[in-house]
Image: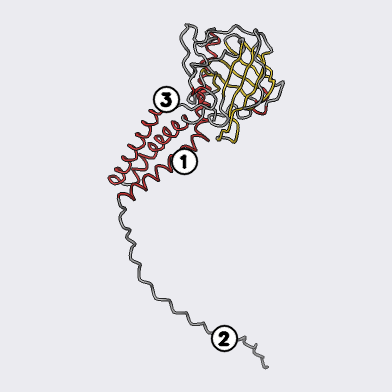
Amino acid sequence: MTTTEAPTSRRSPKPPRAPKAPRPPKRPPRPPVVLAPLTTRQAFARSFAAVAAALLIMFALNLLVFSHVQHLVAQQRLSDDYRAQLEAGIAPVSEGDFEDVLLADGAPVGLLAIPSLGLHEVIVEGTASGVLTAGIGHRRDTVLPGQGGVSVLMGRAAAYGGPFSHLQSLAPGDVITVRTGQGLQEFAVIGLRYAGDPTPPAPKAGESRLILQTSRGAPYVPTGVAYVDAELTSDVQPAGARMTTTATLPASDTALGTDVSTVWALVFAVQFLIAAEIAAVWSLRRIGSQKTWIVFVPVLLLAGFFVADEITRLLPNML
């Protein structure tokens, strides 16, 4: 009996491997680049450019962010103080307090509400740039809102909360209320005007008018003044005594006025920043970059904020 053998399967031979390409020879390491040391003038220029860039950044952050935080904190404090005065019946109704002491700049004198704008703000006495960082200011040479005569309130259009940023959208008939030590005063808007436009006739005896002022133009770039006129629709209140007149009102308290009385504070802030910069350079050479960054970055940021804040106060008061 014969058996047939199964045919054995043969695998095709593998193709020969291609020879590996020869590796390129290793390049010799490049010698380290040695920079020439900076001259004294170059080192000074670099430090000056760094400080200038830091100040510009802090200035922008102060206008766009920190100023609004400052405004919120100030408004909360002022609201608590003024409501306590209203409850105690000692809220001011003239340029002096209940003891006939001249009100300090920034003292609360009223609560402004414009429902159509969703605005609720504490009014402070004075209209200089530093005062309007806290809120809407009352011009000292005018009566309080609701009293016989004309009352002027000024507010910022962009920085520090920008409480009057939408003031120019008010229309005739819109309601404005102001709560003072004499009660709730109600006004109705009668019109919006700009420089050169005809002004409403002066109020007669026994009448009261409110003028709201802010800057017009692009945000943070004022080009003029916008005025909103409103007339009192509730009972007129007796006017309190005024020690400040139009002739004695400082120029810094007028529309778009600038206040240079705090330049000394800017000088001290710059000195603080320079001292912090010198200390940081000394520390960088003595203890290294890591510890220097940990210690001096917060200090330099704080110094830059002080300088930026003082520079902002030198700008027009309704910015």
221 to the left or right of 209: left
Residue extending furthest toward the left: 286
Residue found 60% across the figure and 30% down from its top? 165
Q: CA distance from mark 2 to mark 3?
A: 97 Å
Q: Position of residue 271 (x, y in %)?
A: 34, 34
Write down the residue under mark 2.
13
Q: Secondary structure at mark 2?
A: loop
31 to the left or right of 181: left
- Number of residues whose C-alpha sits closer than 10 Å to that of mark 3, classed few (under 14), some (14–19) or many (20 or more): few
Marks 1 and 3 close (CB-CB < 8 Å): no
Write down the residue under mark 3.
261
Say which amino acid is labelled 1: Ile
Q: Earlier in the sequence, mark 2 or mark 3?
A: 2
- Number of residues whose C-alpha sits closer than 10 Å to that of mark 2, classed few (under 14), some (14–19) or many (20 or more): few
23 to the left or right of 4: left
Residue 10's image quarter?
Answer: bottom right
Q: Earlier in the sequence, mark 1 or mark 2?
A: 2
Front-lying residue, 184 or 314: 314
State how many labels appear: 3
Residue 88 image label: none
Q: Secondary structure at mark 1?
A: helix
Write down the residue under mark 1.
57
Say which amino acid is labelled 3: Ser
Q: How is the image coloured?
A: secondary structure
61 to the left or right of 203: left
Location of residue 181 with respect to 11 vertically, above or below? above
Location of residue 36 with respect to 83 vertically, above or below? below
Q: Nearer the viewer, mark 1 or mark 2?
A: 1
Q: CA distance from mark 1 to mark 2?
A: 73 Å
Q: CA distance from mark 1 to mark 3?
A: 25 Å
